[in-house]
Amino acid sequence: MEIKKFIEEFKGFTVQEFEHLTYAMIKPDAVVAKEEILQDIEHRGFKILFQQEYQFSKQLAENFYSEHAGKGFYDRLVAQMTAGPVVVLILEKQGEIPCYQVWRNELGATNPANAAEGTLRNVYTYKLFGGPEMYAQEKATNCFHGADSVASVIRESNLVLYDMLMSI
Ligand code: CMP
């Protein structure tokens, strides 16, 4: 959906509705498998409300991940997130469990070496990088991002949608 049209819809979402949404991303080095991943996401029961390839600026990446500023992996994270376009996703899944939590369950652990078999990070780390060793050697990402709370869903989607709007 076109960005301005989606933002009109987005502005109307209530906090209760955000329980059934999440903010997600396909990270730059996994975008090569975008079409397969989008199908996989739908097969896992998520409705893709919004998707857009978008190049993060250094400033946006630093702002997005500001809670990690100063940590050992922060500079690498910012470099990886700005190395090429990401796919920005706003997903919907109705149910008892908040959507962000269901999405994180589908992702598996942050470190792909610990991601359970069949989870997205497990599947695509093997497909794209041959296994989790590349992540351990800091040469690859964990392929996906997922907001970690309803507050993060709201913060992250606002931040990125606003940046997109300003870039038009
Ligand atoms: P993401 O879900 O995008 O949220 C924060 C990101 O920081 C995370 O995925 C990883 O890419 C990265 N990250 C978090 N913890 C570590 C870690 N201990 N070592 C390396 N990267 C990390």
Image (cartoon, grey):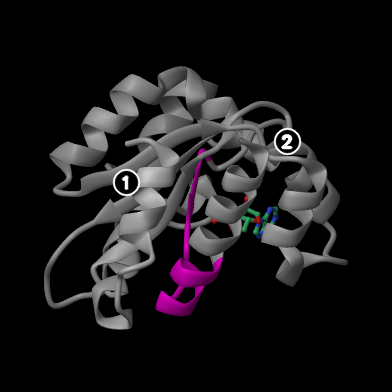
40 left or right, relative to 24:
left
Amino acid type of the residue that numbered disc 2 sits on in the rendered structure: Thr
| The image quarter in which residue 16 lies | bottom left
Q: Residue at x 43, y 44 (%)?
A: 4
98 left or right, relative to 4:
left
Q: Nearer the viewer, residue 156 or 95?
A: 156
Task: Where is residue 34? Give x, y as percent.
Answer: 40, 24
Q: Secondary structure at mark 1?
A: loop
Q: Residue at x 53, y 52 (%)?
A: 161
* Residue range corresponding to the magenta coloring: 143-155
Amino acid type of the residue that numbered disc 1 sits on in the rendered structure: Thr
Would you name the residue on which mark 1 appears?
Answer: 119
Do the CB atoms of the residues marked 2 and 1 lie less than 8 Å apart? Answer: no
Q: In this view of the protein, can residue 108 be seen by the observer?
A: no
Q: Nearer the viewer, residue 75 or 62?
A: 62
144 in magenta: yes
Q: In this view of the protein, can residue 88 be seen by the observer?
A: yes
Task: Where is residue 28? Give x, y as percent.
Answer: 59, 30
